[in-house]
């Protein structure tokens, strides 16, 4: 062990001891490197594990980690106390399906525009803006699933890690693997350069293996696969190799599937999550439960269908589009009810890439989580989908997803009680990520926080 790491170990041991010992003299003069201690007080806490809120909650934080959690816990000397008042504390929310480097105008619905008009660099800067909006809505971690140009998601992830910009922790996929044509199989313009910027197209098992290795070399934390693009479909053999190669490197596989046939192939290959899966054929439900494959429903609220009418133009055509939207969404809600009843676990994912008028990206994403209630999910199920379940899907359950000792101090406080009314998730009052306060809406006078002696 080097001199430096021995000194570090001594410091860490010293800090651990100072929590448990009754103020020995050396603990009162902390070394300059000692991480700050913060105590959060709140009327209620949902810790991610229990069904009920813990009253009179105290969370002790040292540096970036949670040290202790309890009701009416004594606060050690030398701790900065942030009294958040009549709010509910929650684990930082996780969006398992984001697109921070893409924003499509909701009115025009032209999803190709930004891909043609913006460079990866420009999109990464857009991602910095949208990432901050996610964080301020209480989403402290995202899994960003492609359409990030040439690995712009990795650049954004690293910039946030280095503290260059404020944003959520990112699990990045790099370019999605896809059948020929990417997600634009019928594009009439010469689109190959665009396809190669957004996707790695795969034909055959060796190309599939190579594409996973390329993604990992590019910095991927997870692998995104477009199993079907409505026209072409990856084969079971290709999918099996993708899963095998990704799992060998402990990367989860997210499978974009919109057809029954591609859902079957993905489930049989043993992916970690079915993204969208708007229909879920009955024969895949039991294997999904058995293989612990998550469903990431990206459905959204029924009211979005009304936007078709607001667009103007051909009234009859808009009315038909609205009707179709409501039919599809009602069907998607029915499959979510069926999946949850059968025991399929759900991880929350917004798939938000639209600029929603009047809402930040984070507010729009949270709105999509709340929409699971329209399919009958209980508030506690929605909270779990956006915390503990998502953390497990991202393979970060040791660090994130619940409020308990040794986990990263990612916490959100909302007004009201989201266990009673899930709409409380919209009333974000306080956000902490990695032990750092990101948002604090208390009055300036209240923000002069006490330090216990
Ligand atoms: Zn998506």
Image (cartoon, rainbow, N blue to C red):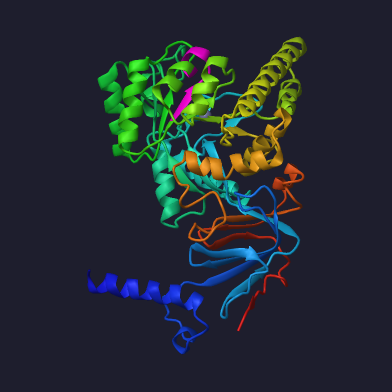
Image coordinates of residue 65 in percent, x first then y, are 49, 62
Please give the range of residues in magenta.
Answer: 254-263
Residue with the most extreme bottom position? 25
**Image quadrant in which the N terminus is located:** bottom left
Residue 211: give x, y in percent of width and height.
31, 27
In this rendering, does residue 274 appear at all?
no
Between 136 and 83, the one lying in front of the other is 83
**Count of numbered tags:** 0
Q: Is residue 246 above or below residue 192?
A: below
The answer to whether 286 is drawn above or below residue 172 in the figure is above
Measured from the top left, where is residue 237 in percent x and y? Answer: 33, 17
Quadrant showing the C terminus: bottom right
Is 44 left or right of 433, judged from the image as shown?
A: right
| Magenta run includes residue 257 | yes
- Residue under the point 76% across and 10% down: 316
Q: Determine which quarter of the picture holds residue 285.
A: top right
Give the residue at x 43% y 47%: 157
Query: Please, which residue is most extreme toward the left here?
Result: 2
Q: Using the rendered image of the protein, determine whether residue 351 is visible from the camera's viewpoint.
A: yes
Based on the displayed image, in which of its 4 quarters is residue 223 positioned? top left
């Amino acid at each position: 062990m080097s001199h430096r790491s021995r000194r570090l170990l001594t410091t860490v041991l010293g800090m651990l001891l100072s929590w448990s010992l009754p103020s020995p003299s050396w603990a009162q003069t902390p070394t300059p490197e000692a991480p700050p201690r913060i105590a959060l007080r709140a009327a209620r806490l949902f810790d991610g594990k229990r069904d009920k809120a813990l009253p009179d909650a105290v969370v002790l934080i040292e540096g970036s980690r949670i040290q202790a959690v309890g009701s009416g816990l004594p606060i050690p000397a030398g701790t900065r106390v942030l009294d958040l008042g009549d709010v509910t504390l929650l684990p930082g929310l996780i969006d398992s399906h984001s697109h921070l480097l893409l924003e499509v105008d909701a009115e025009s619905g032209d999803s190709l525009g930004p891909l043609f008009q913006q460079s990866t660099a420009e999109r990464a800067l857009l991602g910095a803006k949208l990432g901050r909006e996610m964080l301020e809505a209480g989403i402290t971690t995202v899994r960003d699933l492609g359409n990030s140009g040439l690995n712009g998601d990795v650049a954004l992830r690293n910039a946030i890690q280095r503290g260059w910009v404020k944003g959520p922790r990112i699990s990045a996929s790099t370019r999605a693997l896809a059948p020929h044509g990417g997600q634009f199989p019928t594009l009439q313009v010469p689109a190959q350069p665009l396809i190669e910027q957004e996707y790695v197209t795969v034909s055959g098992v060796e190309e599939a293996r190579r594409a996973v290795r390329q993604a990992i070399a590019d910095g991927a934390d997870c692998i995104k696969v477009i199993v079907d693009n409505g026209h072409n479909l990856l084969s079971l053999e290709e999918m099996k190799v993708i899963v095998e190669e990704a799992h060998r490197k402990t990367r989860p596989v997210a499978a974009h599937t919109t057809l029954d046939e591609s859902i079957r192939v993905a489930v049989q290959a043993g992916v970690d999550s079915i993204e969208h899966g708007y229909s879920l054929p009955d024969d895949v439900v039991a294997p999904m439960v058995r293989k612990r494959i998550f469903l990431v429903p990206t459905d959204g609220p029924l009211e979005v269908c009304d936007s078709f009418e607001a667009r103007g133009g051909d009234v009859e055509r808009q009315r038909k589009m609205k009707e179709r939207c409501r039919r599809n969404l009602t069907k998607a809600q029915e499959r979510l009810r069926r999946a949850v009843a059968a025991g399929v676990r759900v991880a929350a994912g917004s798939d938000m890439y639209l600029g929603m008028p009047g809402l930040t990206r984070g507010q729009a994403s949270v709105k999509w989580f709340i929409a699971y209630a329209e399919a009958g999910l209980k508030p506690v199920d929605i909270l779990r989908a956006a915390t503990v379940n998502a953390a497990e899907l991202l393979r970060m359950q040791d660090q994130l997803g619940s409020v308990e000792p040794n986990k990263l101090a990612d916490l959100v406080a909302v007004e009201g009680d989201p266990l009673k009314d899930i709409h409380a998730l919209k009333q974000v009052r306080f956000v902490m990520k990695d032990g750092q306060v990101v948002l604090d809406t208390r009055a300036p006078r209240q923000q002069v926080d006490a330090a216990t002696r």
